[in-house]
Image: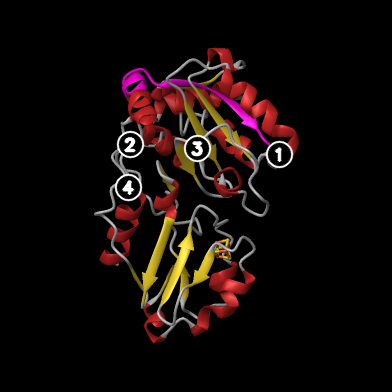
Amino acid sequence: MNFIYELKSFLFPKNVLNFDTASPVHPTSRGIPVPTSKLEQGTKTLVRSAEICPTRAMRILSDSEVQFDYGKCLQCGMCTEVSDGSLRDSGFIYTFALSRDELKVTYKSGRMQKVTDLPFPLTENQQRFKELTKKRGFLYREVAASGNNTVESELNASFNSVFDSEREGVRCVASPKHADAIVFSGPVGQNMAGPLETAWDVIAEPKALIACGTEAVSGGLYALGKLPKEPDLYISGDPPRPDVILQGFRLLMGRFSFRFQEALHKILENE
Ligand code: SF4
């Protein structure tokens, strides 16, 4: 059976995801919630949405302003359902960034506050990692740190013939001693903080720590545990799709020019 799938992929290469034409908005995914024009009338209609949000990803700042921390958002759609049309599911799934703050977005009277002039420069470590991996890709050790294995399912899928992680030179290895990066999932419970730190410590520099999934980025439904350091890449989503994970990796390697807030702003303004 495997042989048939392999042969089909070989004969019909169009089934392999084309990174250059892939869109941050996915037609069948719920994606992140965004305000509609109805919010021009004020944020009162969002009180119930903010209350119901299980991760407190949404905060009402004033009568006209609301903030979403998409690093906390599970993309569950619950806030949209009770918003009386003030929110909608955008289908925007590229919720990844090199800086945690970039995933926090404020909307005023329903319009996203433009933030393109915010610097978000690369850290020295991100710059060194980019130089190391831009041409050759990287090897990573995955650490399941108290998660529910959904991220691991998506990471497994990233190696199938549709997403084909290996064409980017990105592979998973058994030992952190052979790895350039750690990809971890889950909110890092007490019992996993030590193993995560040990795995991190044995990797030679430059190296990258990658938070994969909403729980790894912010804790999600739980408190986020102790990390060895600030992650170099944040990939939110519960879980993120394989293409989102791979585009995040490509961003870290400097092969994909992407800014979360810029991309979201562009899409919302053009709708
Ligand atoms: S976690 Fe769910 S309820 Fe909260 S902002 Fe995200 S989609 Fe809305």
Residue at left 62%, top 17%? 174
**Image position, residue 194 (x, y; %):** 69, 28
Quadrant of image for the C terminus? bottom left
**Name of the residue lying farthest toward the top:** 178
Name the amino acid, label 4. Arg
Give the camera-side residue of 39 and 228: 228
Q: Residue furthest right?
A: 191
- Camera-near label (1 vs 2) is 2
SS at circle 3: loop
SS assignment at label 2: loop
Locate residue 81, reporting x and y percent: 57, 73
Which residue is denoted by mark 2 in the rendering?
122
Amino acid at circle 1 = Ser
Q: Are marks 1 and 2 in contact (CB under 8 Å)?
A: no
Magenta stretch: give its range. Answer: 131-146
Q: In which quarter of the image is residue 90?
A: bottom left
Horizontal placement of 269 versus 50: left or right? left
Q: Name the residue under label 1.
A: 146
